[in-house]
Amino acid sequence: MKFKKNIKICVAAGHGKSKNGGFDPGACSGCFREFDIAKETAKYLSQYLRSAGFDTELINYNGDLYLTERVEKINSGDFYFALEIHLNAGGGTGSEVYYPKGSAQGRRAAALISSGIAEAFSIPDRGAKTKDGRNGRDYFAVVRDTKPLTLLVETLFIDSDDVENVSSASGRDLCARAISKAVLAFFSEKAAPFTVKILCDELNVRDGPGTWHKINMTVRNGDVFTVVEKNGNWGRLKSGAGWINLSNNLVEMRETEKEL
């Protein structure tokens, strides 16, 4: 399946530039450094997504962006979806992916990616996860402070036998292919009907799934609608009026199927 190039995805390598301007390799084990593996995996992933038709940008491949700079770059790029690639540490095994608390689409995307990596390498699927920081907010800044749906992908553990899976270019390529396949599955999904309640004062209903599409009308706080199709962070209304942004600060989504 080929996707229209108006779906913009950002792929970031985790770590690199440190807060003081030096170099942060991330977790290290033996001769392996997290940043080195993450950047190559991110490079392959961006190539696969671009080949699938997504408008894809790779950032921080040269380790030139500190965490807050990566967040700013993601927020300034009008991206639809973003992924930051990491390796885990702590002596465990398996893949896990962190998504924003309360985001149903984030949990779905994270679960697809985690299971895809696990299947590719025959390692445990630790699943879609959230992590609390201060005041109950998301712990990871790249998940918490970015405008588009952003996931932090802990591909596998650098300090266990897991790392042998990505010790070579072919292994990193396989990891990227697994993530790409999961992203394709996420964007290909036709969600079962579910209802949404508008939380903001006014929300634009657009002619297509993205801010570049023309505004057909606006809906108001408290209005409830049925969404019959999802495309990333956007939902198509059953009424035929158009598409709305499904960000959790704009609408309240229900997990179960329900027709109005």
Image: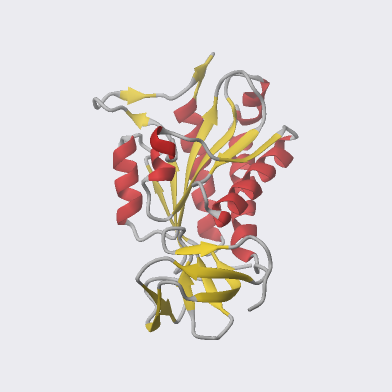
In the rendered image, the vertical position of residue 148 relative to residue 69, given as above or below: below
Residue drawn at x 61%, y 18% is: 91
- Give coordinates of residue 128: x percent, y percent: 61, 42
Work out which quarter of the rendered image holds the N terminus and state it: bottom right
User: Left or right of 106: which side holds 206?
Assistant: left
- Give coordinates of residue 39: x percent, y percent: 46, 36
In the rendered image, the vertical position of residue 249 relative to residue 67, given as above or below: below
Residue drawn at x 36%, y 51% is: 74
User: Left or right of 22: which side holds 86?
Assistant: right
- Give coordinates of residue 2: x percent, y percent: 59, 68
Residue 144 quadrant: top left
Residue at the top extreme? 30
Residue drawn at x 44%, y 38% is: 136
Q: Nearer the viewer, residue 208 or 242?
A: 242
Work out which quarter of the rendered image holds the C terminus and state it: bottom right
Residue 166 quadrant: top right
